[in-house]
Amino acid sequence: MKNKALILIFVAVFGAGAICWYFYGSKTNQPAAISESAAIEIIRNQFPEMGDYPSDNLPPKSIKTEPADGGWYVAFIQEGSGVPVISARCFLVKNDKSLMQRKYDSPGNILAGDFSAKECRVVENSAGGDKDEHGCIGSAGYFWCQAKQKCLRPGEEPCEGNAGNPTCVLETCHGLDIICGANPPEACTMMYGIGDKCLQYAKCGVLNGKCQPLQNPQFTQCKSCVQTCIDENQNNNSGLFECESKCN
């Protein structure tokens, strides 16, 4: 009887231990979640040419990330002006430190929007979300030309207004200081300026007989984010561009 009791105790203890290992110990085999910075470093170690991202060279280079199921989506982006993204290299970095490179999907006719590291492409702003009363999509650079009675984009077709039909459009090519008037730029240089990405949200209109910037929550939010980046990275250009890349 004594031997049988010892055997039963041994079986009970062993069984309980096996159950605990199954429910708890086996989980330790799952790789620990890696950090955002660790995912970026894994890519840089395998692709040394990515070491100069972010950079304030022209065109600027930035990094954008998004959490993935069991890892991170990471995009190394070369930005422009007029065309949001010149080129991009995208990766999926798993928690086990393996990575997969993903193909960049050119934006085609999309001239304004947010870059998705997960989809590796520029995602167009919500349809109709920023159309004015004439149906012109400001995020794509269009404004209402009173003289021609249609939506136009600066640099593609001039709006030849007159004193009887004044225009009120964005005259700013770069930066956060918005200027509205009747003379849209015929073309903007490819030189990128801090805050240029916010211009897709800027709007102009006539209020009380004066052409002036219109209140736009998207532009205000983007401008505030970029201004914070400027204040926090006054002597750190790479940090400034990395911070600005996260402003939407």
Image (cartoon, rainbow, N blue to C red):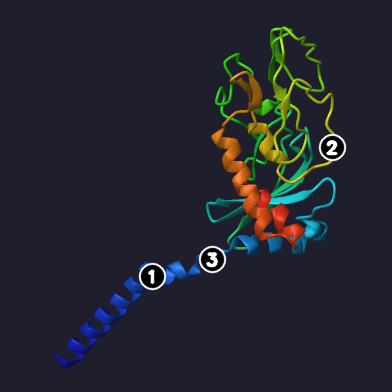
Closer to us: 186 or 12: 186
Density class for disc 2 (Cα within 10 Å; few <14, some 14-19, many ≥20) is: some
| SS at badge 1 | loop
For marks 1 and 3, the one nearer the N-term is 1
For label 2, the residue is 190
The residue to which callout 1 is attached is: 24
- Which element type, helix, strand or loop, lies under badge 2? loop
**Image location of residue 87, percent across then percent down:** 78, 41
Residue 118 can be seen, yes or no? no
Q: Which mark is residue 31?
A: 3
> Does 58 sit above or below residue 183?
below
Disc 2 versus disc 1: nearer the observer: 2
Q: Position of residue 8 (x, y in %)?
A: 21, 82
SS under mark 3: loop
**Residue 244 visible to the viewer:** yes
Which quadrant of the figure has residue 220? top right
Q: Is residue 136 above or below residue 223?
A: above
Question: In percent of the image, x 70 and y 63: which residue is there?
Answer: 41
Q: Residue at x 84, y 27 (%)?
A: 187
Question: Where does the image place residue 7, in percent across and percent down from the top left?
Answer: 23, 85
Q: CA distance from mark 2 to mark 1?
A: 56 Å
